Image: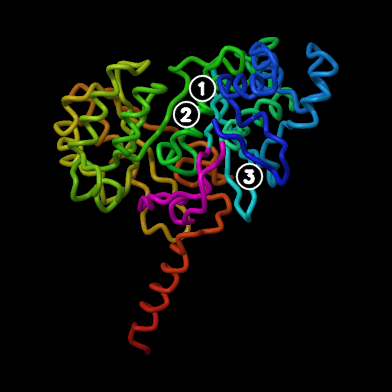
Amino acid sequence: MTQRLYGSDMINLLDFDQTALAAWFAARGEKPFRARQVLRWVHRGLCDRVEAMSDLARATREALARDAQIRAPAVLRDSTASDGTRKWLLDVGGGNAVEAVYIPEADRGTLCISSQAGCALDCAFCSTGKQGFNRNLAPGEIIGQLWHANRALLEAGVAAPWVEHGRHPITNVVMMGMGEPLANFEPVVGAMRLMLDSNAYGLSRRRVTLSTAGLVPGIDRLREQCPVALAVSLHAPNDALRDVLVPINRKYPLRELLAACLRYIERAPRDFVTFEYVMLDGVNDAPEQARELALRVREVPCKFNLIPFNPFANSGFSTSPRARIAAFQSVLQDAGYVATVRATRGADIDAACGQLAGQVHDKTKRREQRIAVRRTAVAAEPQP
């Protein structure tokens, strides 16, 4: 894992998994077990000061404090929805901010984590993609979202059945926030290794889910290096429609994507892939499209998560009526698939699926291009 500098030679301890931290200590002439000690303080203990690491020798603490710090992204805004969903807007510098969302449920606490400032994939129905893209997040900026959320929830005295003494409130992590995780592969995998490390957060592979729009080489790399639960943003039953909704499909069409999913299952912690399917009124929600979808994925052990579209300004889409979603679901269930409809959470604070936007200093100039296109279209309209 690559260290990240913050205007000095001080490292951010959040940027290191155990292997990288052990190598860093070894280069300083320290024993490898120091890495385990520090990792436990930073992640298991959610410590924010090197000086507080009381089982390190005083001289070691003083030397470490000169060279290292614990620095998570600063909170710009903290919002809580009527259903208990909580969203943090986190400063990642350069005019950029990302969002992390906590979703409390009866038996778990799930955190949705961002991996990029913006997203370059430009999926048609996603608010993040409309913001453009600035950069990949560093490992510490990714795991720092989990570190901060656990601290904030503990400080707020979160009362839930699963929060036992000494345990963190976050039991599940989904890499489904801003950005395409597999387009920021090494930092994301480094952060996930910390999530899985028993000296850090100790989550099982079944409780960490990565969602991808379909970067086939990244799926294969993840299979080899860190196979966690996999979710794939499918959203269409054929290449013609998916090319429009999920443009990366033009590079990795459905045939290649589904083959990669089949390979992935060989090493996955679950014996299925979850296919996410956002329900767009009059676009991809017809019963015949459901039948086509059922046939398309028949070789891949899978479950479907149907997601009612969450509107945002100028999206150009609307949410499928409930009856239409139910009819689509019934077709899939009749074909033998498990198909659930995702409950919309946090919509009143724009924390629902597809609504995360944060603040992005767009390097792609995508927003400016869209504005120019709209202005040209308006100017070309006949004047009354």
Q: Is residue 151 above or below residue 74?
A: above
**Rendering coords of residue 122 (x, y %):** 38, 53
Q: Is residue 373 above or below residue 380?
A: above
Kindly identify which residue carries mark 2.
Answer: 189
Label 2: how many Cα within 10 Å (few below 14, some 14–19, many 20+):
many
Q: Name which residue lies at 65% across and 23% down.
A: 27
Q: Name which residue lies at 24% across and 42% down.
A: 252
- Of the residues shown, which amino acid type is indicated by label 3? Leu
Label 1: how many Cα within 10 Å (few below 14, some 14–19, many 20+):
many
Can residue 258 be seen from the camera position used here?
Answer: yes
Q: Could you tell me which secondary element the residue under label 1 belongs to?
A: helix
Kindly identify which residue carries mark 3.
Answer: 89
Q: Could you tell me which secondary element the residue under label 3 belongs to?
A: strand
Q: Which of 314/27 is in front?
A: 27
Q: Quadrant of the N terminus?
A: top right
Q: Report the side of 198 relative to 34 (left or right).
A: left
**Rendering coords of residue 274 (x, y %):** 33, 27
Q: Name which residue lies at 22% across and 32% down.
A: 258
State the CA–CA distance, disc 1 to disc 3.
Answer: 24 Å
Kindly identify which residue carries mark 1.
Answer: 193
